[in-house]
Image: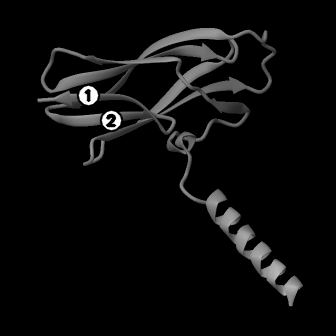
Amino acid sequence: MRNEKRWMVLGFVLTLVAAGCSGQPGPADLAPSPEPGVVRTEVTPAVTDIVLLESFPVQVRLIVQGELPNPCSRLGWYVKPGDDQGRIELALYADQTTDAACIQVVAEYSEPIPIGAFEHGSFVVFVNGQLVEEFTLP
């Protein structure tokens, strides 16, 4: 009887773990798949800032700054347009070809990323699933 309970508990725990691993897609899944022969890694910006351009509708840029794993990596991003909740999601990543020989030192980047044009509302910006900025347009 005791072994049966252990097996039931173990089966329940394994079911929960499997369900947790197959849940929502991650932030990098927002972006299109890389080409064959390219390795994609998620990039976390060290600094972010919102810039509102003087236009109508207001054009919004997210400035991201940080470090790429090496100088051969190319910074890439995909912006999922804002939803009715004002949530804007951005996948930020680095692509590098697998056949490139590259010195292993970090490379700094600073990039203004256009995230949309808006007339009014409150918005929150997420980069790779992490809240980084908020802004409101009257």
Give the percent coordinates (x, y) of residue 2: 86, 85
Query: Is 26 rendered above or below residue 79?
Result: below
Give the percent coordinates (x, y) of residue 102: 78, 13
Which quadrant is home to the N terminus?
bottom right
Which quarter of the figure has residue 17? bottom right
Relative placement, left or right, of 100 versus 45 is right
At 27% across and 41% down in the image, what residue appears? 86
At 49% across and 29% down in the image, what residue appears? 77
For this rendering, which residue is in front, 46 or 103? 46
Give the percent coordinates (x, y) of residue 63: 40, 16
Indicate the colouring scheme: one colour
Q: Which residue is mark 2?
A: 124
Which quarter of the figure has residue 9? bottom right
For this rendering, which residue is in front, 85 or 110? 85
SS class, disc 2: strand
For marks 2 and 1, the one nearer the N-term is: 2
Q: Residue 135: which disc?
A: 1
